[in-house]
Amino acid sequence: MSKFRVLVSDPISEQGLQALIDSPLVDLDLKTDLTPAELREIIGDYDALLVRSQTKVTAELLEAGKNLRAIGRAGVGVDNIDVPAATRHGVVVINAPDGNTISTCEHTFAMMMAMARKIPQAHMKLKNGTWDRKSFVGVELNHKTLGVLGFGRIGSEVAKRAKAFGMDVLAYDPFLTRERAESLGVRMSTVDEIVEGSDFITVHTPLTKDTKHLLSRDQFARMRDGVRILNCARGGIIDEKALAEALENGKVAAAALDVFEEEPPVGNPLIEMDTVVVTPHLGASTEEAQINVAIDVAKELLNILQGLPFRNAVNLPSLSNDTLRTLEPYLTLAEKLGTLAANLAVDSVRKIEIGIYGSLSEQQTEPLTRSFLKGMLSYYHGDEVNYVNAPFLAEQSQIQLKETKASRHDTYTELLKVTVVTENTTITVAGTHKASLGSRIVQIGEFKVDLEPQGTLLLAENRDQPGMIGKVGTILGVNGVNIDSMKVGKLENGIALMVLAVDRAPDEETRRSIEALEGIFSVRDVTL
Ligand SMILES: NC(=O)c1ccc[n+]([C@@H]2O[C@H](COP(=O)([O-])OP(=O)(O)OC[C@H]3O[C@@H](n4cnc5c(N)ncnc54)[C@H](O)[C@@H]3O)[C@@H](O)[C@H]2O)c1
Ligand SMILES: O=C(O)[C@H](O)COP(=O)(O)O
């Protein structure tokens, strides 16, 4: 078996990557000095690419990466990766969101203290030979108000430390709940309350179209005089021009910046200002964080390539281990139902209605839709389809998706029922799972059935009359197709569905002979 080729194009801790280096499944290349053009030239040879924030994973690079299955980001921010393009190409993007939280939080705190006590400025002056005790009078953190915009992993850790320093903390995050704010002893606030009521403001959001220039000229004008500003998240969350003006006119007393709109900054006036403390994007640069993120990303990549569940995909829904355990049998079943439906659909699919019933409806259900789509669309697009790009391909084919959920079903404790509406037909397939019985297909079209979703099935719609099974069985036998088991579903109108589990799909001629039998309406085979 050929090895899974991984390229590491940014400096990532080799100690952290040890699991990948040691894996007999992996061939790992460290090439951290490549120009974009050189990277584009060789990327086609690799199955996975591991990066930090330097390598720009553009749509063009992804286009050249014909064999790419995964991009691993040894860190949090994926703004250097064109995630929509990766999704289109079916490339999963994983990051390592937990490994550098503490380092970045501690860096933010170090920056806050350095700024409050003017440590870098005093340090430089003394190093240059001047003992100056007058120019560097600072401010205490104690009893000051810290506003935290973005209260995720790093923002909340910063808040905990600020509390220990006697600060009053205001927090804003669209996902922050009152209970969580109370449990951490912070005041849940609006952006305006933070802007107008803080002595220090720190941002810890990702850079998105909503957070771009979250702190702009208008906001600076409304801040307390002498406010101090921190950005150890992403350049661009703060409008750098507006910040420079506010520092210039004294509205802002000082700023501490680890990140910039352009990195490395070129001709950025903030770098020159005495009141601004700067570091070159060092938030995650500790020995511990670099080992952590490399370990996390290596582990995830090994899981991906062994087909095991993984947690930190940016372009796939993230599932807790519990959810994954509950959903796992249904993910497989959904994919098989998708394959079955695709084999039954005779013309182009217009709409897919996914019904999720019983206790299953309490779970995160988007992965079920993805799995169904993967099974269904693979029939049309082959290996090109995976969990990452299946929704994109459905959207591209203008297939409407509808999901309905109900906490109860009359017959089944849990049921996954999918109706596919095509140009001219409507096909329903349904399945359920029980730990004691395994998975079962329980409906095909209008027929109630009870089938194991595996192997090759021959489906023959026929008139419900004696002798039909024998006739079909004889033709299969003569043509060397062995029947393993058989199930029949019947309708009240005298039509039946014969489902035969066979050891191989009958050839075209055999299928035609069965179709030609009197009383047979249609014959299909599907391999699940
Ligand atoms: N300087 C560094 O080296 C460094 C290191 C690690 C992380 N980071 C950056 O720090 C940022 C935060 O990282 P994290 O691990 O805490 O991420 P996180 O996902 O845990 O937290 C981000 C939070 O921002 C919130 N948010 C999103 N939009 C918002 C908005 N409009 N207003 C307010 N809040 C909003 C989210 O709800 C989320 O809770 C990221 O941008 C990351 O790239 C920088
Ligand atoms: O988003 C992140 O994880 C940080 O910005 C760290 O980036 P780096 O890996 O380039 O240090």
Image (tube, rainbow, N blue to C red):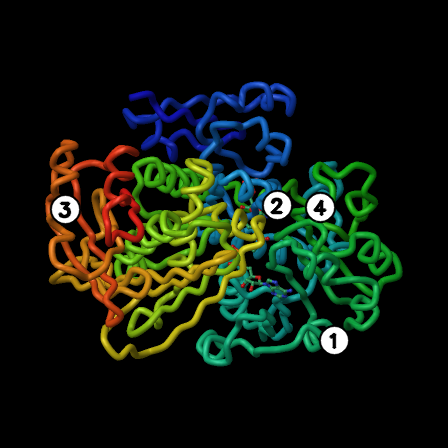
Residue neighbourhood size for the residue with mark 1, other residues' Cα within 10 Å, grouped as few (<14), some (14–19), many (≥20): some
Residue 260 numbered tag = 4
Task: Please name the residue shown 52% across and 27% down the image.
Answer: 66
Q: Amino acid at mark 1?
A: Glu
Residue position marked by numbered label 3 in the rendering:
471
Q: Earlier in the sequence, mark 3 or mark 4?
A: 4
Q: Nearer the viewer, mark 1 or mark 3?
A: 3
Image quarter (top left, top right, bottom left or bottom right) of the C terminus: top left
Q: Nearer the viewer, mark 3 or mark 4?
A: 3
Name the foreground residue: 237 vs 72: 72
Q: Earlier in the sequence, mark 1 or mark 3?
A: 1
Along the horizontal axis of the image, is 446 left or right of 71?
left
Q: Amino acid at mark 2?
A: Asp
Q: Earlier in the sequence, mark 1 or mark 4?
A: 1
The quarter of the image that holds ligand 1 is bottom right
Q: Nearer the viewer, mark 2 or mark 4?
A: 2
C-alpha span from label 1 to label 3: 84 Å
Residue position marked by numbered label 1 in the rendering:
196
Q: Nearer the viewer, mark 3 or mark 2?
A: 3
Image quarter (top left, top right, bottom left or bottom right) of the N terminus: top left
Q: Amino acid at mark 4?
A: Phe
Label 1 beta carbon within 8 A of ligand 1? no
Q: Nearer the viewer, mark 2 or mark 1?
A: 2
